[in-house]
Image (cartoon, rainbow, N blue to C red):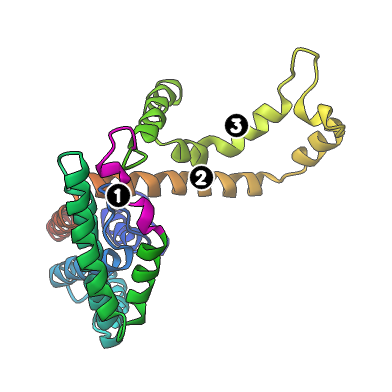
Amino acid sequence: MKLKKNDKLDEVIFSFCCLLLGVTTMQAPFELYYVELYKRYWEVRTAIRKCIKMCGLESEYLNILFELDELLSSVVTDESIKMLVNELKDYYHYFKRLCDILTDVKDKGKTVREEVEKKARRFLTEMKTKSRNHPEFKKIVTRLEKYWNGLFYTYEFNYIPSTNNELEGYIKDFKRVWKRITGFYNVNRWISFHGPFAVYMFNFRKNVNGQSPFEVLGLDTSTINVIFREVSIETFKNERVKQMELRETYRLRLKVNQIGAKEYLGSLVKTFENEIENIKRS
């Protein structure tokens, strides 16, 4: 769908489409991607149906909304997909139980270690029983048995860390410095926005000996310059549009993660309703 300039209704419909492209969450353990995506489809379809009720029969946007509704309905009402989602929820229940066993520990010592190991062994026994009828649970049993001997030392000895959070703390400190330098906290996001241009500039930057990386590698920079000059203005403009769309997608994802999908969809429906009222008044 091609957006019209300053068309609020088109912008709302475009945002609906963007919300279907991917789901991310900023909270560990990041839940289950496909379960969250399925839930997002339900929420977007609900918002679209609210917008359909607001549109008049002559509205040019009605067909687009109906097509989106039909597409989403084909997913959320599919019984096989529903079954898979429920299975994932069931698997996640057991995964969460194991996480609680290994993380809900407030002290150290031999007694603590034995208690955690006892709970984990009961869990392992349950998984072995379930794995007779569910092959997926065999994977849990295999992984637990493989690493069993090294799982519980951290609960007895203070000098053995239970996670790599301390190391990630150093990365977090680096990101603070990175944000002061670049304005972006997320390194990957900065690379997505500015990486191609930065690589281009770095490759032509001269070192103390007056050579660029291209020249150090023995490449003919004059030939490369000629190649770059042969890029048409149309290609340059198309790539620039792609970069701008990528930035907007990142901003949208970040906003949805911060305020929540349901709240964001509510604001889109409200914007759609206000614009319909403005059109009717005019």
| Crowd tier of the residue under label 3, counting other residues whose Cα lies within 10 Å: few below 14, some 14–19, many 20 or above | few
Nearer the observer: mark 1 or 3; the answer is 1
Callouts 1 and 2 close, C-beta under 8 Å: no
Residue 17: where, in percent of width, then height?
34, 63
Q: Which residue, given by chain and number where applicable, does mark 2 sit on? A: 243
Identify which amino acid the numbered label 1 is placed on: Phe
Residue 206 counted in the magenta span:
no
Say which element carries label 1.
loop
Q: Which residue, given by chain and number where applicable, does mark 3 sit on? A: 198
Per the rendered image, the range of residues in magenta is 147-160
| Crowd tier of the residue under label 2, counting other residues whose Cα lies within 10 Å: few below 14, some 14–19, many 20 or above | some
Residue 165: where, in percent of width, then height?
33, 37
Q: Which residue, given by chain and number where applicable, does mark 1 sit on? A: 152
CA gap between label 1 and label 3 equals: 46 Å
Say which element carries label 2.
helix
Q: Residue at x 30, y 53 (%)?
A: 7
Q: Which residue is drawn at 71% across and 22% down?
A: 205
